Amino acid sequence: MFGVDDKGLDKVDRAILNALCSQFGGGPVGLSTLAISVSEQTETIEDVYEPFLIQQGMIARTPRGRVAMASAWEHLGLQAPAQNPDLFSS
């Protein structure tokens, strides 16, 4: 009914991961840019969605922005880019 998958992610969680991986090549991407790409407020991303995604090992916060971890790529059925494999390892 709410579109929650087997990992506990809802449609907004998946939209965030999809934006990070598909639109921004895994990151790093700034919070404002990420929020605009999924049509959410920055505060909502930072306070509601990001903590769970970090806890699940799907994304990480870096000084340069948010990055998708290997588990995010795997969950979406995508292959992480080979140009910087250390950035996406868990």
Image (cartoon, rainbow, N blue to C red):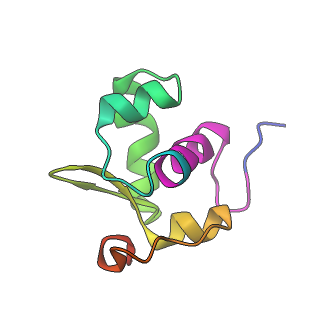
Residue found at the far front of this picture: 83
Nearer to the camera, 15 or 3: 15
Q: Is residue 61 left or right of residue 35?
A: left
x, y (%) of residue 88? 38, 71
- Magenta residue check for 30: no
- Magenta residue check for 13: yes
Residue at 50%, 71% in the rendered image:
80
Residue at 34%, 35% in the rendered image:
46
- Please give the range of residues in magenta: 5-21
Magenta span dominant secondary structure: helix
- Look at the picture and state if 56 lies above or below 79: above
Residue at 36%, 53% in the rendered image:
27
x, y (%) of residue 61? 26, 53
Tell me where residue 57 sits by quadrant.
Answer: bottom left
Residue at 41%, 20% in the rendered image:
41
Q: Is residue 10 left or right of residue 42?
A: right
Residue found at the far right of this picture: 1
